[in-house]
Image (tube, rainbow, N blue to C red):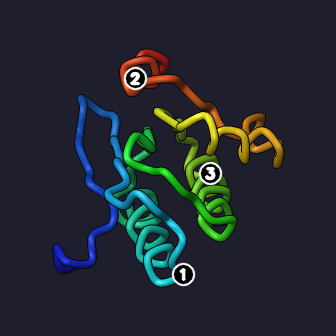
Amino acid sequence: MAAGHRRVDIEEVSDVTIAKFIDKKILDEGNIQIIGTQLFGLVDEDGRKKIILDFSNVEYLSSAALGKLITLDKKVKKAKGKLKLCSIRPDIYEVFAITRLNQLFDIAETQEAALEGF
């Protein structure tokens, strides 16, 4: 995938994959598709089982993006892996709480805290 189309930075910390969102606003359907493709590829193509999604750059998140996260969670669980989310701003966390997704996802305050649980 061309660097211009990357929406997620990938970093490896031992056997854990950290995916950090590049965009401040994850609203555009095209970008959400690219993000979904990148994240699903981590599981489907690369066989990664321990994934942390870092939201520290994200200020806005659309409901379509939440759908991609739910699909990713299902893929990771099917692969017997573990998905964690971290560094979510309070106003975005509120959306997770309202939709009860905070009960589906393992959400940590910081990247360090997320890494500790693996």
Quadrant location of the C terminus in the rendered image: top left
Q: Position of residue 72 (x, y in %)?
A: 57, 58
Q: Amino acid at mark 2?
A: Leu
Judged from this view, the residue extending furthest toward the left is 3
Q: Residue at x 62, y 45 (%)?
A: 92
Looking at marks 3 and 2 on the same chain, the residue that comes earlier in the sequence is marked by: 3
Residue at 43%, 76% (x, y): give it.
31
In this rendering, position of residue 57 left or right of residue 89:
left
> Is residue 49 shown above or below 22?
above
Cα separation, mark 1 vs mark 2, equals: 30 Å
- Say what amino acid the circle numbered 1 marks: Glu
Residue indicated by mark 3: 73
- Frontmost of labels 1 and 2 is 1
Category of crowding for the residue at label 3, using alpha-carbon neighbours closer than 10 angstroms: few (below 14), some (14–19), many (at least 20): many
Q: Secondary structure at mark 2?
A: helix
In the depicted view, which residue is nearer to us: 95 or 14?
95
Q: Is residue 15 left or right of residue 69?
A: left
Could you tell me residue 107's position as x and y percent? 59, 31
Q: Which residue is mark 2?
A: 115
Are the residues tagged 3 and 2 within 8 Å (C-beta)?
Answer: no
Q: CA distance from mark 1 to mark 3?
A: 20 Å
Q: Could you say which is closer to the camera, residue 113 or residue 90?
A: 90
In the current view of this chain or complex, which residue is farthest to the bottom?
Answer: 30
Name the residue carrying label 1: 29
In this orientation, does residue 5 appear? yes
* Quadrant of the rendered image containing residue 101: top right
Please report the residue visible at 39 percent of the width from the left and 27 percent of the height from the top: 111
